[in-house]
Amino acid sequence: MKLNTEANISDHGMADLQALLNLFSQLMRPEIQNAKTNFGRTLANYFQKRLCRPVDEPDAFLLLAVLIPHFSPAFYDQIFVEYFGEGNFPELGGVRGKQHRGILLTGEMLLYLYCKKDLSLKQKMYRRWFSEEHWLFNESIVQLEAPALGEPRLSGKLILAQEYVELFLTGKLGKPDLGADFPAKLISTQQQWQDLVLHPQTYKQVENLQAWLDYGDALLKDWGLARRVKPGYRVLFFGPPGTGKTMTAALLGKSADKDVYRVDLSMVVSKYIGETEKNLAKLFDKAEHKGWILFFDEADSLFGKRTGVQNAHDRYANQEVSYLLQRIEDYDGLVILASNFKDNIDEAFLRRFQAIVSFPLPRAGERLRLWQLSLPSALELAADINLKVIADRYELSGADIVNIVHYVCLLAMAEKRQNLNKEQLILGIERELKKNGK
């Protein structure tokens, strides 16, 4: 019997997957021999288009096999009964899920589907697929679940990362949601670089970060610095609240077309011994090899100075800091720590930062620029409002100025006005200063 591989694998969507599923179903027939080559070429082409990297036939087979339960839940049950008869299929492997009623792929099952009873091929594919160096596992695209105590390693389920399930089903790589398994939230901005007002020296240092995002990979690979320089880049942003630290992180991601995730430290730090390390492991395991920018805001609670060891709690707290330090050093992307004060951060971290960027409160000229950028053109200013005088007199951060503008615009809109008088502006400024305890 000849295997028909003339499938239409072109665009995204379920039609393509169904065509591959039909080919896969044919391939399971016992009478088909040596048919993998043509099928593998078609399959590898499909996954290569979506992953934008070379995918050979065995890895394409693995990806389809682990993807099947996500779009055809009954497939393995039906195919096994049709071609192998009724039974529990112990030789094939496979497990049932807690809620999913169909058969789920295990390492044992993958080897059987690909190798049948060819023992030498099984040994070869075991060494290939289940080594730590294999890119699908190393980049956490596929995971082999740890088996129950005492059971064979390959009896664990093979799990496809959810964002890649979405990529293969919809053509778009999914984004992880904030939750217990990923304690970080995607942040973005509608602002542009011209909307950011910083001290000139701060701008210069931020431009250096942009240069790393643009050329960091080439520096390591093309210029051969990978032997001497660790991957990734670590930087501290420090300065008072509202001076542009978060906005700068978001703009760096926007300009480099990289996702920026702000880590929710309340979900990371735990009073229970060992839990903080587990939460950090989930974060870094998910982020590894994605090129994401990790932004730790108000980082003092996690990156603060270590204490002297006076009890078991202190010892474990210091272990958590050491673990975090190691994971940050091994991370291959940009890690930004933000703090109000540089001196609050443990020196062990500071020594390993490539850059420390100060975000001071804006000076008078910078405050004037912030006022000009923040006030909407639809709001007419009274003749007695001199923004230069306002900027010179009141020491405010960029966030303070935005809050004031927001307040006075709401007042004007509620009163059906499109103008702003000096009294209202001063009221807004005094309200913001009082809120900040000034």
Image (cartoon, grey):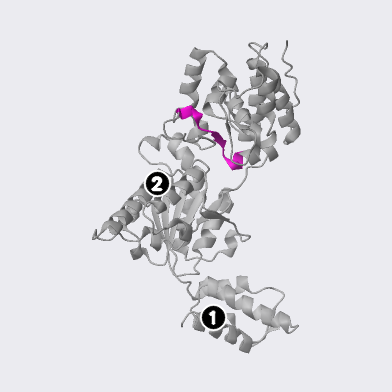
Q: Name above or below for residue 296 compared with residue 108.
A: below
Residue kind at label 2, given as amino acid type: Arg
The image position of residue 200, as x and y in percent, is 47, 63
Residue depicted at x 38% and y 41%: 230
Q: Which mark is residue 65?
A: none
402 falls in the magenta region:
no
- Please tell me how many numbered marks the rendered image carries: 2
The image position of residue 18, as x and y in percent, is 73, 30
Residue reaching furthest to the front: 87
Q: Name above or below for residue 114 compared with residue 342.
A: above
Q: Name above or below for residue 149 compared with residue 414.
A: above
The answer to whether residue 425 of the structure is visible from this angle is yes
Q: Which mark is residue 432?
A: 1
Foreground of the two, 199 or 103? 103
Q: Is residue 413 left or right of residue 436?
A: right
Residue kind at label 1, given as amino acid type: Glu
Residue depicted at x 56% and y 75%: 401
Foreground of the two, 390 or 431? 431
The image position of residue 39, as x and y in percent, is 67, 19
Q: Name above or below for residue 353 compared with residue 197.
A: above
Label 2 element class: helix
Quadrant of the image occupied by residue 74? top right
Residue interval drawn in magenta: 152-164
158 falls in the magenta region:
yes
Foreground of the two, 108 or 15? 108
Quadrant of the image occupied by residue 410? bottom right
Tags 1 and 2 in contact by the CB under 8 Å rule? no
Query: Closer to the observer: label 1 or label 2?
Result: 2
Q: Is residue 263 left or right of residue 379?
A: left
The residue that mark 2 highlights is 327
